[in-house]
Amino acid sequence: MSDNAKTFEKAAKTFQKIFRDPLILRQLSDQQVEWRFIPKRAPWYGGFWERLVGITKESLAKILERSKPTFNAFRALVADAEFILNDRPLEESSSQVGDEESLCPAHLMYGRRLNTLPYNEELAEETLDSSYAERPNELKKALVRHQTLLKQFEKRFINSYLPALREYHQATKKDQATVIKERDVVLIHDEKPRKEWKLAVVENLIRSCDG
């Protein structure tokens, strides 16, 4: 599922040419792979990923503030932030020893959590020591800055993400049918000034699986 960004639409047209190959088409069919676009001008259809992107951007902006990292440093930070996002649990975590670990997005993409690679706890504790940054090696200083920013990002993301799971639209808490119905007159949101938005009449409601 994706929105209707021009880059996605252009890529989809390119893929359509590739899909003409019978072998590729058969493999995609066997794996039930299909690319679907959400309706145009309906960003709420992609609300679950738009909210995640918003929280991530806000968290990165807060921890970086007015600092100006190099492109490579920023790219490394975003790559590690992606690990944090894809390792977030999708179900309740168990505190019992021996229970299976909670399912996370990384399991669906790679078959394992992304943080299961060998990791040196002693080195991590040493690099977070304030005296470590005072050593002359520039690479060590860069490592300290990176790990400090990453920990700050993880804390801010969790503090923003968990409350977002409890959010819901105030207008829908009593009766969803009262929000919008057929034959309602509505304004069509546009990039133009609000006074230039067009009027329309709702002909049909397309309901998602959750209503």
Image (cartoon, rainbow, N blue to C red):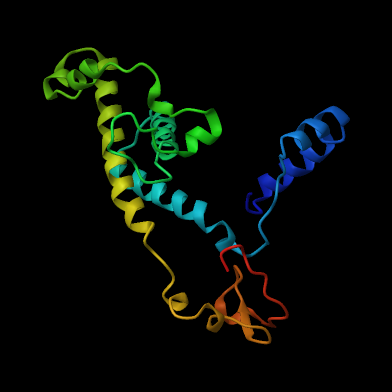
Q: Residue at x 36, y 46 (%)?
A: 92
Q: Residue at x 36, y 16 (%)?
A: 118
Above or below, comparing residue 85 to residue 177 in the picture: above
Could you tell whether 134 is left or right of 165 in the image? Answer: left
Above or below, comparing residue 180 to residue 88 in the picture: below
One can see residue 66 in this view: no
Above or below, comparing residue 132 to residue 159 in the picture: above
One can see residue 120 in this view: yes
Residue 151's spot in the image, x, y percent?
27, 35
Q: Quadrant location of the C terminus? A: bottom right
- Locate residue 124: give its quadrant: top left
Could you tell whether 83 is left or right of 180 in the image? Answer: left
- Locate residue 94: give its quadrant: top left
Residue 110's spot in the image, x, y percent?
53, 28
Q: Which residue is drawn at 28% across and 50% down?
A: 159
Question: Which of 10 and 116 lies nearest the eye of the viewer?
Answer: 116
Could you tell whether 41 is left or right of 103 in the image? Answer: right
Residue 130's spot in the image, x, y percent?
13, 25
Q: Which residue is drawn at 37% across and 50% down?
A: 58
